[in-house]
Image (cartoon, rainbow, N blue to C red):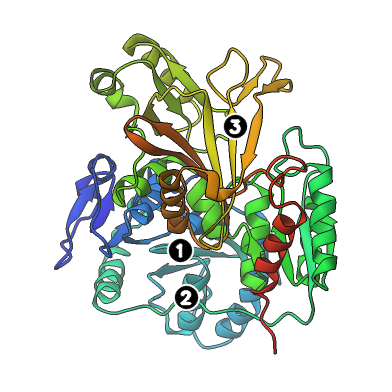
Amino acid sequence: MILVDRLKDLPFQVPGARVMRVRDYLALDNGVRNRRVINLCHSYEYLSRGYYCSLLAAARSERVIPEADVLLDLNWKRLQKTARAEMSSQIVDALAKPGDHPTKIDVFFGRTTDKRFRDIAQRAFDQFRCPILRLHLNPTDKRILREIEAPALNQLGAEDLPAFESAIRAYLRGRVRKPTGGGNPPSALVAILYDPDAVLPPSDSDALALFVQAASDLGAKAELITAKDFHHLSEFDALLIRETTALDHHTYRFAKRARKEGIPVIDDPESILRCTNKVYLAELLRTHRIPAPRSAIFDKRRVGEIGKQFSFPSVIKVPDGCFSRGVRKVKSPEHLAEVASEMFKNSELLVIQEYVETTFDWRIGVLGGEPLFASRYFMAPGHWQIVKHEDDGKSYEEGGFETVAVEDAPADIVSTALAAARLMGDGLYGVDMKETPRGPMVIEVNDNPNIDGGVEDVVLGMDLYRRIIAHLLAKIARP
C-alpha cells in the first residue's frame, strides 16, 4: 500500500500496489498483518499526519517505511551531525572520479542515478530508511555534506520522477537489507539515568540508592548519570532509565544510542515508542483484542461524529501525555468540542476513551514477560485520577496505595496485564488496569513505571531491585 495526501501526488501506477489517501488510512478500523506500507506524506514532522501513519502502521503489524523512530532521527540535529561526518569523506572520494560536482544527491529507496554515489546512497538509506532522501552538498567546505533531508514526493521535479518510479518498483520487487550493528561490552558497569530536578520522577532517591546497592550485590557497579552525560554513555555496559521518557526527548536518544552501541537498556527505544503514544497503544490493543475501554482515534473533522458515537462523560487524551497530564474528562458533546479544540493545537490526532469509574487502578509490574509486583493506586481525594495536578503546573496531590503479593491480586487482572505487556517487548512495564463488572480492562501500558522506596517494593523488598538489575545484566554480551 502506498499512502499519499492526494491521489494526484503519485502520477504513475505501481503494479501490485494500492494507493490510498492518508485521511482514509487513518480512519481504517484495522490493518493487514505484514502488509508493506510506503508512506509518502507531505510532512514527516513529529505529531503530523505523516508521523501518525507510520506509527499506526507499526501498531497494525504492518511493515512501514519510514518507521516512526526514523522520522525522529531525521529531526535530531546531533545524530544528523554524526551521520554527515561519517559520510563526508566517502563523498569526497566519489567526487574525485570523473563527473560534475552536484549540489545535491537524491536517494530513492537506497538508489541514485549517479553511479559514483551508489554506496553512499545505500549507506544513507541504511541509517535513515526513508523513501526519499536528499543529501545537500557544500563544495566550499571540507565537511562537504551540509544536510540530510527527507523531501516530500511533491517536491521532486518532473525530471526526477522516472528515477523515483524505477526505484519504487525495484524496492517492491525485492528485499532491501537491514542495517547491522552491535558490540560486546567489556565489563558490568551500569548507568542509571535520572533527573535530579524532576517533580514526579519514576524513582525517588531511596529507590535509586537501592538500585545501586542491587548492582553491587550482583557483582556489578551502578552510577547515576544525567542528560549531560550523553557523550559518556559508551563507557557503560548497561543503561537503566529512571527518568520519565518521551519520544522528542533526550531519554529516547539515550535509548537509541544505547541500542546502536550494543548496550542493553531498560527502557529500550521500541518500548518507549510503543508505550508513550496513546494513539499507538489504542490501536495495538484493538488489533490484538486485549480488553480495554472503548476508544477511538479522531481528528478535527470527526469531532461531531465522535460526539454522537460516545456516551458521556468520556476521557480525551493527547497522544504523549504522562502522569495524568494531557488527559481531560468531558461531560457532553459540546464540552468535547471545546476541549478538543484546545488540545488539537498540540496534536493532529486525539484519543477518546470510554470513562470507567473506579476507586482505584491496579498497577501490575511486568519484567521480561513475568509479573513483578501488584499495587493498587487510589484516586486522589475528590478527583477522578490518581494524581491531581494544580493549576500552577507544579503542585499535585496523589491518592494512597496498597501493594500486595502478585498471587493475591485477581488472576484475570494479572493475566490480562501480562498479555498487554508482552506486546510491548521483554523489558520493564507497568500496566494500569481497571477491575470492572465487565471484566479486566487495560488503561495504559507504561514503559517507565514507578519504582519508589516503600511503595512498589513493599512485598519483595530488595529482591525487586535485584531482579531488575539481574534482568539487565543478563543481556550483556560476553566474549
How far is disc 3 from disc 2 in space, using C-alphas? 52 Å
**Front-most of residues 61 and 174:** 61
Mark 3: amino acid: Tyr
Residue 88 location (% of width, % of height): 64, 74
Badge nearest the viewer, 3 or 2: 3
Find residue 121 and name its label.
Answer: 2
Residue at position x 74%, y 42% from top?
452
Near mark 3 (Cα within 10 A), the count class, few <14, some 14-19 or many ≥20, is many
- Label at residue 377: 3
Q: Is residue 15 visible?
A: yes
Q: What type is the residue that disc 1 sits on?
A: Leu
- Badge 1: residue crowd in 10 Å (few <14, some 14–19, many ≥20): many
Q: In which quarter of the image is the N terminus?
A: bottom left
Q: Which amino acid does label 2 sit on?
A: Ala
Residue 80 appears in the figure: no
The residue at the point 54 percent across, 88 percent down is: 97
Tag 1 near tag 2, CB within 8 Å: yes
Position of 164 relative to 455 (above/below): below
Residue found at x 83% / y 67%: 217
